[in-house]
Amino acid sequence: MALSGAPGCRAGERGPRWRRPWKLLALGLLSASSVLAAAPGAGAMSREEKRRLGNQVLEMFDHAYSNYMEHAYPADELMPLTCRGRVRGQEPSRGDVDDALGKFSLTLIDTLDTLVVLNKTKEFEEAVKKVIKDVNLDNDIVVSVFETNIRVLGGLLGGHSVAIMLKEKGEYMQWYNGELLHMAKELGYKLLPAFNTTSGLPYPRVNLKFGVRHPEARTGTETDTCTACAGTLILEFAALSRFTGTSIFEEYARKALDFIWEKRQRSSNLVGVTINIHTGDWVRKDSGVGAGIDSYYEYLLKAYVLLGDDSFLERFNTHYDAIMRYISQPPLLLDVHIHKPMLNARTWMDSLLAFFPGLQVLKGDIRPAIETHEMLYQVIKKHNFLPEAFTTDFRVHWAQHPLRPEFAESTYFLYKATGDPYYLEVGKTLIENLNKYARVPCGFAAMKDVRTGSHEDRMDSFFLAEMFKYLYLLFADKEDMIFDIEDYIFTTEAHLLPLWLSTTNQTISKKNTSTEYTELDDSNFDWTCPNTQILFPNDPMFAQSIREPLKNVVDKSCPRGISRAEESLGSGPKPPLRARDFMASNPEHLEILKKMGVSLIHLKDGRVQLVQHAVQAASSLDAEDGLRFMQEMIELSSQQQKEQQLPPRAVQIVSHPFFGRVVLTAGPAQFGMDLSKHKAGTRGFVATIKPYNGCSEITNPEAVKEKIALMQRGQCMFAEKARNIQKAGAIGGIVIDDNEGSSSDTAPLFQMAGDGKNTDDITIPMLFLFNKEGNIILDAIREYEAVEVLLSDKAKDRDLEMENMDQKSSESDSHKPNSEEAPSESQDAGAVSEEPEGGGESSAVGAPDPLSPASAASASAPVADQDPHASGPAEAGAPEPACTPGDSQPQEQNAQTEASSKAHWDSKVQPMESILADWNEDIEAFEMMEKDEL
């Protein structure tokens, strides 16, 4: 397959006249074989190295998949830290995240076609039989229409696609008779009640058994849905119609897409994040290419590829033109307001936009794809993973990373489009980081905080469905595949749909003639038909020349992209003043503020306050600039206030058999040693003190001396506990929450405050662990007696040398399984109370155990549109912005508990003895964890 033009497709030709040379646009179809050779000095990767990395990906997949099948199946997902399945209703609710779980063995279905891509045909055949035999789609449970469509319906259709391919080849699946397709059709009908709205937009949730409006459905009251939720249905629903000959599915999905297109903001051609499913009004009017919108754009382009309807390409090109005009600020992609697209809606980006460079490759717009991808890679090199959100100056905004595959996806497409071995090295980095920081004995654990390296007890199904698929394809040669990947298109969940569906059971549809398409600059269509002579103008250094200026973009002081005003105005008027650039001592800045209707008030304490009166602005345009400036200043002020809070710390178990693989998220203290200034941290064996509350003189100082003391929260001040253990000779302390079942997974982190007095006398580090994390250490002590931990600001590299020595020495040893049961999590792990024992409110001074929030929840909501001529003043504190290393804190969700699930889900028990027999040394790392049985 060449990247050059095809018959009927001339470079620069407008989209509607293109006769669908499918293989040029199908995901995974861009072959590097005919693209430029590696640039001189680029260090082309040897075939042996590619083969080695491909095999490493296979081994990693086996590690994740086999642990799910052994310890979690038939549950929806694996909890890799506690080696058990996640069953909805039996774990504290994680809010909307749990709407993907429907008690239908989600991970297995999501992984079906991955098994075939990775040449695991025998495992695939066994998996299909399990799905047919075990999976029930008639559960009384409320699920996300969006997630169920892309993961379950898409997984069944992808499995069916490769099953009939294998059957046709004649070696495997000869018994298969469309069972997965029958299940897909059953599920499709169960999703249809969600479309019972006047607009045709689906409800965001549906009950698999009772639909939407049934009295027992427990859903159907929602009014809003996200644009991606309603606009990411066409591939799966159309494929279901084409496979079965039942047109209703494709018709419903088309109607939803048509409605979103009609409701786009006509002057900007942008869509908002959330829309009212009954009225079509935009609820959130910010627009970007990340969370809430992302796959809507993706499915417009891919619907054209799969279905051949020119209107989908016209819509995509119209939106793409608007994205490149307003949202793209190379290398950044920043959300804007749909009615005021020159006004940025926020100053941070979310990680889901990492898919966009891959989509730009399919569009053929390579330069911005390379730029954005390189910027994201620099963020990854700084934090090991891509944080869920990061600011425009590349600081962490939300610190979680649930092992998302979007960056790997874009890396794969860029390599296929350019043939540049640089992207193989990027993939190698992803593999190394996954193995080094996310791999645990029972799979791969999501990162709770990329700054500390702490883990979260989750391994989402998309990790198996997408990550390993893209990484394997990145390093695989054509002869490594048992089928031609270029005959398929990838859905947003990377499921495979055959391109021959374009000519099968076509739904008769008329082009939408009620809408006039905006006349666009013809240059927007230059990239409709990818051609290497245009993308790479005979310059083998092309991609490298684009990346080079971005190599240090993350490490620069307050870096920012070139603004649109600077690009368009050239030497004309200066661009609007940005909040991050404002200096209260700059006379020119003060003059600009005055022009925008913003007054500066000097307060007695030396701070300044900004107040805007839009009616005092020189013009309506200046008033709009002033409003944007105030919005930016409010968000900047909020971020800096958060940065004054101490970031979370890490407790890493480094002794046998853990060797640093278990990292616990810990709350810091406002007193004692600052671990951020002592990079080596404090390392030592732990010891439980007497009395356990630490509120009086320690009676076992000989056991505590030169060790890290463990104590229980309550009955006195944190600082008093610290002084008592320091007097006994401890080198550090860990306070364990006494609220049974509390966990950093479900409760906001807290930092321990002082006692209102001078605490300079406390020199040892103190950290706070919630009950669940604290029990992990206590259980380890009961099992292994001598447990060594490292208190630090972030997790350190594992002690691989000691681990290897221990593994060799353990080959001849037998291991006795732990017979003690860990305490059960019987209580809701919600926000930890700040009250002392006995109840009552605690004050900042003089109350036992004062806790101040260390990571108060989350990011600012997008600012709603306001009238720039409104008479009411807007106020914001105006600290002088500066580049500081502080990061915003991760967003947390309150825990809730759902109703208990059916009894047959409680019958899956994994005996510890069999785990030990299978995993030997690895599994010992988790013997002390909770042994809650499903």
Image: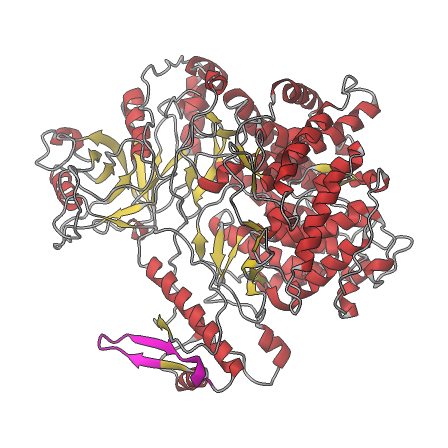
Determine which quarter of the picture holds residue 11.
Answer: bottom right
Q: In screen coordinates, is 570 left or right of 171? A: left
Residue 224 seen from this side:
yes
Residue span colored magenta:
600-617
The answer to which of 212 and 6 lies nearer the viewer is 212
Q: Is residue 671 above or below residue 513?
A: above
Q: Residue 403, image x and y in percent?
A: 53, 41
Q: Residue 828, image x and y in percent?
A: 34, 34
The answer to which of 747 and 620 lies nearer the viewer is 620
Q: Residue at x 62, y 76 (%)?
A: 567
Q: Is residue 277 above or below residue 705?
A: below
Q: In screen coordinates, is 643 left or right of 181? A: left
Furthest toward the right, the residue is 7
Determine which quarter of the picture holds residue 285.
Answer: bottom right
Residue 38 seen from this side:
no
Q: In screen coordinates, is 465 left or right of 249? A: left
The answer to which of 535 and 857 lies nearer the viewer is 857
Q: Is residue 402 magenta?
A: no
Q: How is the image coloured?
A: secondary structure
Quadrant that contains the C terminus? top left
Q: Residue 95, image x and y in percent?
A: 45, 40
User: Looking at the image, how many numbered discs can be counted on the residues?
Assistant: 0
Q: In screen coordinates, is 28 left or right of 911? A: right
Q: Residue 518, image x and y in percent?
A: 74, 67
